[in-house]
Image (cartoon, rainbow, N blue to C red):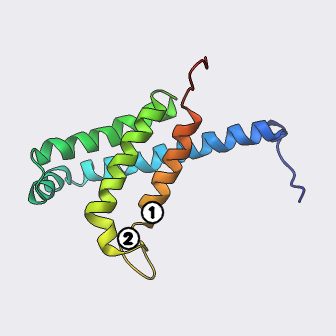
Amino acid sequence: MQLPLPAFLATPAARGAFGWLLLRLTLAGLIAAHGWARLIAGGVVPFGGWLESQGFPFGFAIAASITGIEIVGPLLLVARRFVAPLCLVYMAIYAMGIVLVHAKAGWFVVGLGRNGSEYSVLLIVGLLCVALQHVRSRGEA
């Protein structure tokens, strides 16, 4: 299928680079929204209390750290700094979210279920793909 494309998307390499850019920026925006929403809504303290109720020590510190990394980290993702390590941190955070919250609610976020794992799985896979694009192999400049 032939689509009229702008000149900057004329080659497969340019389309690939644009696709990876779009995915990285979208993930940064989604993650930032998550952290800012928790901060603005006053959710850090309740999140910390919930973590402590689940047996985690220093619940507030963990909640504040997660919120901070969700606010500051997206700026680094946009700037293409520490992309792979940040993606790994976010993948760990959202995997724990699946284990502690979302898996119990099933798969679907809406529709056939509520608060399930599907969105977190999609974030994790997207983060893995972006991380793989920013990992340097040995001998690579």
Q: Quadrant of residue 110?
A: bottom left
In percent of width and height, residue 102 lies at: 33, 67
In percent of width and height, residue 81 lies at: 47, 26
Q: Point out the image quarter for the C terminus.
A: top right
Q: Quadrant of residue 140?
A: top right
In the rendered structure, the answer to whether residue 3 lies left or right of residue 71 reads right
Q: Which residue is mark 1?
A: 119
Binning the other alpha carbons within 10 Å of mark 2 as few (below 14), some (14 to 19) or many (20 upward) gives many
In the rendered structure, the answer to whether residue 77 lies left or right of residue 68 reads right
Q: Point out the image quarter for the N terminus.
A: bottom right
User: Which mark identifies residue 116?
Assistant: 2
In percent of width and height, residue 34 lies at: 36, 52
In the rendered structure, the answer to whether residue 103 lies left or right of residue 80 reads left
* Residue occupying the point 56% across, 21% down: 138
- In the image, 46 versus 89, the foreground residue is 89
In the rendered structure, the answer to whether residue 117 lies left or right of residue 43 reads right
Q: Separation of disc 1 and disc 2 at Cα?
A: 8 Å
Give above or below for 48 relative to 77: below
Looking at this rendering, what residue extends furthest in the right direction? 2
Give the residue type at disc 1.
Tyr
Give the residue type at disc 2.
Gly
- In the image, 84 versus 69, the foreground residue is 84
In percent of width and height, residue 99 lies at: 30, 61
Badge 1 marks a residue whose secondary structure is: helix
